[in-house]
Amino acid sequence: MTENQKTSCQRCGCKVSSDDQYNVNGLILCDDCYLEESSPVKACNPLAVYSAKRFEAEGGPQAEERLNEQQKAIYDYIKTKGKATPKELCNKFGLSPRELENQVAILRHLELTKGKKEDNTLYIVPF
Ligand SMILES: [Zn+2]
């Protein structure tokens, strides 16, 4: 694939370069549509929101048990370091900013991490 090759997103019809497109269930999607399709914390996935909320209410150390391997790794990293910038986490785990945002949103949902501003830099810190 060449970098300039453009395809249309099969959902919203916008032009996406081959670098930015995602193949989901046989559909070529742009970044935004892919995010909508895959984000587990969107309101259109009531079960995910429900279970995260329920979990918050219960609290407790089992919160960690609900994380997937990558979320656990990110959480461990943040716990070990005390704080981490999103950029650092992207580099460390090979995620795009959006993918990271998704993962961090889940950690935030479970009250495992939170955002914290220090000297105009946003850090993600243990809750
Ligand atoms: Zn799209």
Image (cartoon, helix red, strand yellow):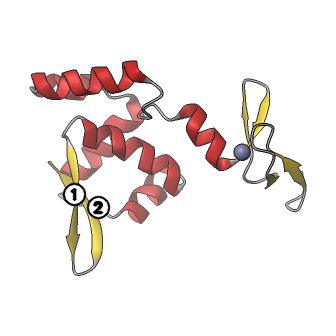
Please state which amino acid type lies under the numbered disc 1: Lys
Dot 1: within a 10 Å radius of its alpha carbon, few (fewer than 14), some, or many (20 or more) residues? few
Q: Is residue 42 left or right of residue 30?
A: left
Q: Which residue is mark 1?
A: 81
**In the image, residue 5 above or below residue 87:** above
**Residue 28 rendering spot, x and y as whole percentages:** 79, 37
User: How far is the residue under mark 1 from the one under mark 2?
Assistant: 7 Å
Q: Quadrant of ligand 1?
A: top right
Please state which amino acid type lies under the numbered disc 2: Ala
Q: Is residue 61 left or right of residue 5?
A: left
Q: Which residue is mark 2?
A: 84
- What residue is shown at x 38% (from left), y 28% (from top)? 68
Mark 1 and mark 2 residues within 8 Å of each other at the beta carbon: yes
**Residue 1 rendering spot, x and y as whole percentages:** 89, 51
Dot 2: within a 10 Å radius of its alpha carbon, few (fewer than 14), some, or many (20 or more) residues? many
**In the image, residue 6 above or below residue 44:** below
**In the image, residue 84 above or below residue 9:** below
Give the SS element for disc 1: helix
Of 86 and 39, which appears nearest the observer?
39
**Residue 84 rendering spot, x and y as whole percentages:** 29, 61
Q: Quadrant location of residue 37?
A: top right
**Residue 90 rendering spot, x and y as whole percentages:** 46, 57
Mark drawn on residue 100: none
